[in-house]
Image (cartoon, rainbow, N blue to C red):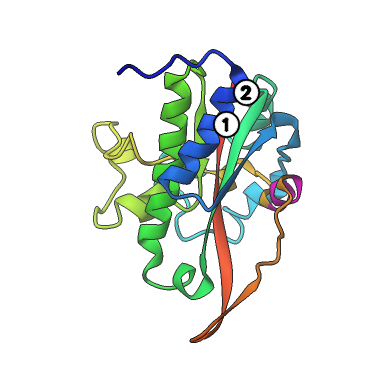
Amino acid sequence: MAKPELNDTAEKLERLVQTALDLGATDARIMSADQIVVDEKLAEKCRNPKCMNYGLSKSCPPHVAGPKAFKKQLETFTRAVFFKIEVPSEILYSTQNLELFQLLHETAAGVEQAAVEMGFTRAAGYAGNSCKMVFCNEHLECRALHGDGQCRNPDRARSSMSGFGVHVGKLYEAAGWPTKHPTHETPSGRFKMASICGLVLID
């Protein structure tokens, strides 16, 4: 049986939130584009002190348009899907975090694709961490920069919010999420939570 056509914008947005959750997000919110704060000083931190991933991929500085261009881009969007993935902090800061960041990128890409299919044709997803580190760490160079110009993972990798100066703390506040992560009590002991987040602009 064919899926019913989604005509109502509110219903589409609800579906996008559910898509984020289905793909692995812990929580997701629809945000107004004007709630996204851009701070050029945050983007500058990619360069000084120099991030270990600086310049290694097409989706990180200096190969992205940067904060000023992102601000102009935001003026043409009305909404965004903001989502987070919560995990114990010991996982985030361990060698197991590669799969976690892969999930982050894939969730942003998946929500973006779902939005395009719903008619939000300019939807644009953003994640965190360098896609070179997350997907192509075993390769010497980013093929999009130094090869034939074609990304090895165009359907999975997304640009990092850091290079555009997106103020994640302000987004957490706007979403009503605590910026300080709680400590969970379990029968086996206490553990502190941490989170990573992604953003998908919706036209």
Q: Quadrant of the N terminus?
A: top left
**Image position, residue 166 (x, y; %):** 65, 44
* Proximity of marks 2 and 1: CB atoms separated by less than 8 Å: yes
- Vertical placement of residue 194 versus 19, above or below: below
Crowdedness of circle 2 by 10 Å Cα count: few (<14), some, many (20+)?
few
Is residue 189 found left or right of 141 in the rendered image?
right
Mark 1 surroundings: few (<14), some (14-19) or many (≥20) residues within 10 A: some
Question: What is the count of numbered marks?
Answer: 2
Q: From the image, tell me which residue sits under label 1.
A: 14
In the image, what residue type sits under mark 1?
Answer: Glu
**What segment carries the magenta color?**
169-174
Asked if the magenta segment contains residue 56, the reply would be no
At a point 45% along the width and 21% down the height, the residue shown is 116
SS class, disc 1: helix
Q: x%, y% of residue 24? A: 44, 50
Q: Main secondary structure of the magenta part?
A: helix
- The residue closer to the viewer here, 76 or 140, is 76
Name the amino acid, label 2.
Ala
Is residue 35 placed above or below 1 in the rendered structure?
below
Between residue 17 and residue 90, name the one nearer to us: 17
Q: CA distance from mark 2 to mark 1?
A: 6 Å
Q: Is residue 79 visible?
A: yes
Q: Please indicate, yes or no, whether residue 64 appears anywhere in the rendered image.
A: no
Residue 12 lies, in percent from the top left, at 54, 24
Q: Residue at x 52, y 32 (%)?
A: 16
Of 55 and 136, the residue lying toward us? 136
Task: Where is residue 118? Give x, y as percent.
Answer: 47, 19
Q: At x 48% / y 75%, what residue is drawn? A: 90
Which residue is the site of mark 2? Answer: 10
Q: Is residue 200 left or right of residue 130?
A: right
Pick the quarter of the image with the C terminus: top right
Compared to residue 163, the image places residue 196 above or below, namely: below
